[in-house]
Image: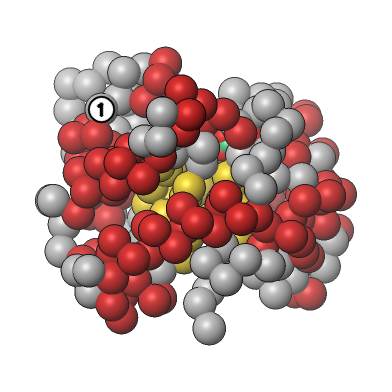
Amino acid sequence: MRKRLVAGNWKMHGSRAENARLLDELLQFDSGAWPAAAAVCPPFVYLQESARQLKDSGIALGAQDICADAGGAFTGEVSAAMLKDVGCRYAIVGHSERRALYAEDDRLVARKFMAAQSHQLVPILCVGESLAEREAGQTEAVVARQLDAVLAVIEPEALVEAVLAYEPVWAIGTGKNASPEQAQAVHAFLRGRIASHDARIAAGLQILYGGSVKASNAAELFAMPDVDGGLVGGASLKADEFAQICSAL
Ligand code: PGA
């Protein structure tokens, strides 16, 4: 039985007061009753305060991004050591917004993956195709390219302490999720590709689906055999909605 995870990506939302309220509400749900692990990824500046609030709870903390370099003259960046220092367990790498809006390419994403692991952070590696790529029949080629860039620089063993997230770009923030069958097809493809390197590691790898996951569609997505949880944006900003998604696993 694979481990399961629901991670909330808050993106650039919230304030000290709003976050405190959201986490307070989340902590009131009995996370012990959730069959899955849960994590939240607030903006960098709120990580430390969120860590304090989540201390001794079942909810882990993640960062939305990470610097590929270890430290030094990298103005504006946040290193893996710093994220570890403030209590992060996860770091999202290669989110499609980073790729599209900040020109992060496959090689940089691969370096970020390694940076996270260099400090025992679990990278959540995002892959996914745009609508134009899907319509051109390139979905598998695109996610394969994004995955292979990381596989080229790590040993398959490194995937034991990693999470993969399939996030079709056309489903992110649009309210239009991939159908369970569409998600399953890509998840199975990704797992198969990793199995060609190491079948045991592929079988144990958590692959999350992201893109308009909500309380109303989580159960049918999570029922798919290769969907091991969710990376949740908008719906993670509402405690009851996020808690319902966690319960759906
Ligand atoms: P969404 O975002 O759930 O709001 O579609 C998902 C993500 O970007 O990780």
Up/down of 194 relative to 116, above or below: below
Label 1, residues with CA under 10 Å away: few <14, some 14-19, many ≥20: some
Q: Is residue 13 above or below residue 206?
A: above
| Res 28 seen here | yes
Residue 43 lies, with reference to residue 22, above or below; the image says: above
As drawn, which residue projects farthest toward the bottom? Answer: 1
Depth order, front residue of 246/132:
132
From the image, tell me which residue sits under label 1: 105
Q: Is residue 240 left or right of residue 200?
A: right
Q: Amino acid at mark 1?
A: Asp
Q: Nearer the viewer, residue 127 or 129?
A: 129
Q: Quadrant of ligand 1?
A: top right
Residue at (74% x, 55% y) in the render? 218
The response on whether ligand 1 sits within 8 Å of label 1 is: no
Residue 238 falls in which quadrant of the image? top right
Q: SS class of the residue under badge 1? A: loop
Quarter of the picture holding the C terminus: bottom right
Write the residue at 53% across / 83% down. 1
Residue sitting nearer the eye, 29 or 235: 235
Q: Position of residue 88 (x, y in %)?
A: 47, 51
Q: Is residue 27 visible?
A: no
Tell me the residue at 65%/55% (across/down).
180
Foreground pick, 140 / 21:
140
Q: Residue 164's spot in the image, x, y percent?
A: 42, 54
Residue 144 lies, in percent from the top left, at: 29, 47
Q: Residue at x 61, y 33 (%)?
A: 171
On the image, the x and y values in percent for residue 52 come to 62, 50
Q: Is residue 232 left or right of residue 64?
A: right
Location of residue 57 by image quarter: bottom right
